[in-house]
């Protein structure tokens, strides 16, 4: 059986327009399962995660729930989040340090994006063509890798970008001096810091989209956030559908990047506010091993947590 999640109609409020702590707790309980696996896999224990959660609650309360024309007080933040006022003050007084994306990630990703979307760098079959490393190595009039990089950035040399793409396993250099793309998109085979960067960026924006659509006071139209799912498949059929999903994404990505490149060109010189966008896809394949009893157990725990939270606020 297939199903597709439908967002609310544009401009339409969620059903009640009121906070739904019990439903939110049930959803969060499920969201925390893969997060718990990430924690255990990489040696993060509860105390460090509690500190991260406190910091996130305080930061979001300041950024999104302040009062117009007034500085948000420690007391108000404590009431909104449940974080103790002493912790609120400590976290507000601590300098913010953010881990920037690995410096070569944006450049490398942009080079690959242009390579698979700009017609000059594509074959007749609309696949990324192998590029001579420099103009002198290729045939006259033929596009080359140095030109490709120069069209993306003037701050980083083509050699540095090539070394990074090779390190990540995204390209290979052939014996005749051509650079060949080994993937249809920027998916590093190596480079743990880059993988964590994309995990944070992609999942954060996906979750932010869903949270936006469920906000009780939302007035803006819903954002695109849909998926299709199928159950009771044998492993071989699931594998075939994953291959299909990858092919569909490759085609959609190429079309989207071509339009995005044109939009970028049209935007030059236009004054006013700026938006950032992210368009992505995922395919998840897992065994249907979880029993209904285990699912119900999680739901009961979530409902108990929401009920406890309500009792605390009422006392």
Image: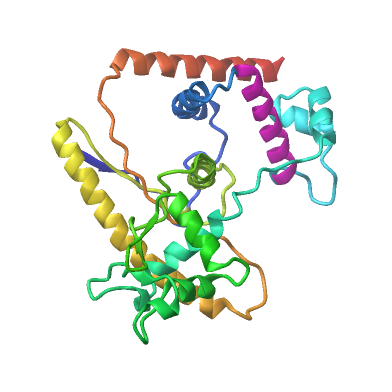
Q: Which residues are magenta?
A: 46-63
* For residue 87, side relative to residue 18 (left or right): right
Q: 97 above or below 52? A: below
Q: Quadrant of residue 271?
A: bottom right
**Horizontal and vertical percent position of residue 151:** 51, 75
The quarter of the rendered structure image containing the N terminus is top left
Q: Is residue 315 visible?
A: yes
**Horizontal and vertical percent position of residue 130:** 33, 68
Q: Nearer the viewer, residue 60 or 175?
A: 175
Q: Residue sitting at 47 percent across and 54 percent down?
A: 223
* For residue 305, side relative to residue 90 (left or right): left
Q: 199 above or below 53? A: below
Q: Nearer the viewer, residue 240 or 87?
A: 240
Residue 47 located within the stretch drawn in magenta: yes
Q: 275 above or below 286? A: below
Q: Quadrant of residue 258?
A: bottom left
């Amino acid at each position: 059986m297939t199903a597709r999640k439908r967002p609310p109609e544009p401009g339409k409020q969620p059903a009640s327009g009121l906070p739904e702590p019990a439903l939110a707790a049930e959803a969060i309980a499920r969201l925390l399962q893969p997060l718990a696996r990430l924690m255990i896999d990489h040696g993060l224990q509860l105390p460090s995660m509690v500190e991260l959660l406190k910091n996130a609650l305080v930061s979001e309360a300041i950024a999104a729930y302040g009062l117009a024309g007034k500085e948000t007080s420690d007391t108000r933040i404590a009431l909104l989040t449940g974080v103790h006022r002493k912790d609120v003050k400590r976290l507000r007084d601590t300098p913010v340090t953010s881990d920037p994306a690995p410096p070569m990630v944006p450049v490398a990703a942009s080079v690959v994006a242009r390579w698979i979307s700009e017609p000059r760098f594509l074959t007749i079959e609309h696949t990324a063509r192998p590029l001579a490393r420099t103009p002198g190595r290729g045939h006259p009039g033929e596009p080359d890798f140095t030109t490709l990089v120069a069209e993306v950035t003037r701050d980083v040399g083509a050699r540095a970008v090539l070394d990074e793409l090779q390190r990540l396993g995204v390209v290979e250099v052939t014996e005749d001096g051509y650079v060949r793309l080994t993937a249809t998109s920027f998916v590093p085979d190596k480079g743990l810091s880059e993988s964590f960067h994309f995990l944070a960026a992609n999942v954060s924006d996906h979750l932010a989209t869903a949270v936006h659509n469920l906000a009780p006071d939302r007035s803006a139209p819903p954002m695109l956030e849909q998926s299709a799912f199928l159950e009771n498949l044998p492993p071989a059929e699931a594998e075939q559908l994953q291959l299909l999903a990858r092919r569909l994404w490759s085609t959609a990505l190429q079309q989207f990047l071509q339009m995005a490149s044109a939009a970028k060109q049209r935007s030059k010189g236009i004054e006013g506010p700026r938006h950032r966008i992210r368009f992505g896809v995922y395919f998840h394949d897992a065994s249907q091993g979880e029993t209904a009893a285990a699912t119900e157990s999680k739901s009961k725990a979530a409902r108990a947590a929401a009920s406890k939270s309500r009792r605390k606020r009422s006392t």
